[in-house]
Amino acid sequence: MAFCTNCGADVPEGNKFCANCGAPVSGTAEPVRNAETNNQNQTYTVTGGYRANIKKRDIAVAVILSIVTCGIYGLIWFIGIINDLNVAANTPEDKSAGMIILLSIITCGIYGYIWLYRAGEKIDKIRQMNGEAPQSSSLLYLLLCIFGLSIVVYCLIQSELNKVAALA
């Protein structure tokens, strides 16, 4: 049995990609784990968790800059969230930030709701890659956005992205 060097999941022999995170499998590297033993069973806890090569952003600063610049920085922040979410969820082939903004403009914002729902699915995938239980964020993000609280959704997404941001 091989282990994914990206997320530590078990990878059956012969697989070229991890079924959990999609990363290419290279050899039989052991995952980074600490063994904690008790009397009868041996349990493992993952140390460090899943990390992605994305930028960690200060949420309070992003919100303040978005307000001070009348939304201009909010658009830049939104583009960064889209790009970082695609990298962290290991879906680089997904729609780019420009395409999402263009589709949202063309559909009078309807595609923005669709994207937020899918962003919740990606956040749940990232949580699973990090060994956490998914929390069904899609519906929460959609409802918050419908009630005009999109900036709260951006803060929630950024908070999840900050958890997996690579240490500098």
Image (spheres, rainbow, N blue to C red):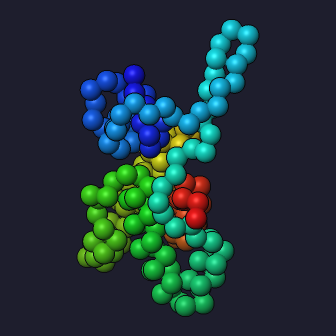
Q: What's the residue at 27%, 35% (across, down)?
A: 16
Residue 137 visible, this orientation: no
Q: Check the picture and name the quadrant holding the N terminus.
A: top left
Answer above or below: position of 125 versus 160.
above
Of residues 48 and 80, which is closer to you in this image? Answer: 48
Q: Check the picture and name the quadrant holding the C terminus.
A: bottom right
- Where residue 77 appears, x then y in whole percent? 49, 76
Q: What's the residue at 27%, 26% (across, down)?
A: 14
Answer above or below: position of 162 versus 109.
above
- Where residue 36 appears, x then y in whole percent? 69, 24
Q: What's the residue at 32%, 42% (across, down)?
A: 24
Side (left or right) of 78 relative to 33: left
Answer above or below: position of 161 versus 11.
below
Q: What's the residue at 64%, 78% (across, down)?
A: 61
- Where residue 151 appears, x then y in whole percent? 55, 71
Of residues 48 and 83, which is closer to you in this image? Answer: 48
- Where residue 69 appears, x then y in whole percent? 55, 91
The image quarter containing residue 167 is bottom right
The residue sitting at the bottom extreme is 69
Side (left or right) of 115 relative to 60: left
Residue 10 visible, this orientation: yes
Side (left or right) of 38 relative to 49: right
